[in-house]
Image: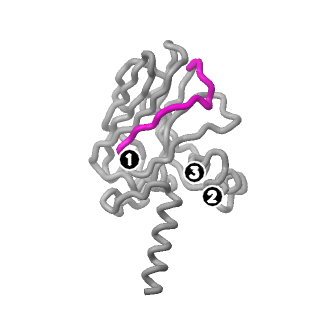
Amino acid sequence: MRLRLLLASVVTTVAALVGTAATAGAVNTATTCVQGPVYWPTTGQVVSSNGSQRSATLNFQMTQAQLNALACSGGYARVAFVTQNSGVPASQAFTLSTNISSPIKDVAAPTASTFAPGAAFAVSSLNANQPYNLTVSWTGGNSNATFTSDWIGAHWASQLNAFERNRCNNGQSQGGWSWCVYQTGASRHSLTGGNVALGGTYPVQ
């Protein structure tokens, strides 16, 4: 009985750490680090709208080989829609909608100068050849804004890195769990091939 209570406590604690715990069926246990040249999705499209409410959506799916290559970057990924000439502050409120399990919504750092809404998530929450979508939406700003949809290989804050450890602070900082996920090296790829206009549809590259 004591063992059962202890196990239940561990499960509850893990669920609290990651926010909404992913269901067992949503976790890709086959995802392991196998070096490969492509750690981003090559199937999908980015759809954006430009009206009273602006939005950007990444629709994608990945092969197991791509997921394994992404796992080598640290076990996490981040999607960031980095805007240019947006006309809104970096801290602009935005809405996140996705079918990815347990996403971590981005929170802009106080020093950020660019509005770049998005989210991070564990690589293990993605299954091969399954369609996923991630949408950010906001109001206000400039109608002639441009953006790039960046796919970022990332890792959880390292206890050996003082900056990452202190900024994460076990999710107790201003940025919550968002400030616990960091880009790994140069693992960053523009799915739109650079800056594109709001209001268009672009195949991932």
Q: Say left or right for 76 vs 22.
A: right
Q: How is the image coloured?
A: one colour
- Stretch of the chain drawn in magenta: 85-100
- Mark 2–mark 3 contact, CB under 8 Å? no
Q: Residue at x 47, y 86 (%)?
A: 2
- Can you identify the residue that label 3 sits on? 177
- Can you identify the residue that label 2 sits on? 170
Determine the CA span between mark 1 and mark 2.
22 Å
Amino acid type of the residue that numbered disc 1 sits on in the rendered structure: Ile
Find out whether residue 96 is within the magenta segment: yes
- Can you identify the residue that label 1 sits on? 100
Image position, residue 59 (x, y; %)? 34, 35
Q: Say left or right for 77 vs 87.
A: left
Give the structural element (helix, strand or loop) at label 1.
Answer: loop
Image position of 159 with respect to 99: above or below? below
- Identify the mark nearer the N-term, 1 or 2: 1
Q: Residue at x 62, y 25 (%)?
A: 89
Query: Which residue is nearer to you in this view: 185 or 81?
Result: 81
Image position of 201 with respect to 40: above or below? above
Give the structural element (helix, strand or loop) at label 2.
Answer: helix
Tell me which secondary structure the magenta stretch mostly adopts: loop
- Identify the mark nearer the N-term, 3 or 1: 1
Q: Residue at x 38, y 34 (%)?
A: 58
On the rendered image, what quadrant is the N terminus found in?
Answer: bottom left
Image position, residue 80 (x, y; %)? 50, 36
Determine the CA span between mark 3 and mark 1.
16 Å
Amino acid type of the residue that numbered disc 3 sits on in the rendered structure: Trp
- Mark 3–mark 1 contact, CB under 8 Å? no
Image position, residue 91 (x, y; %)? 62, 31
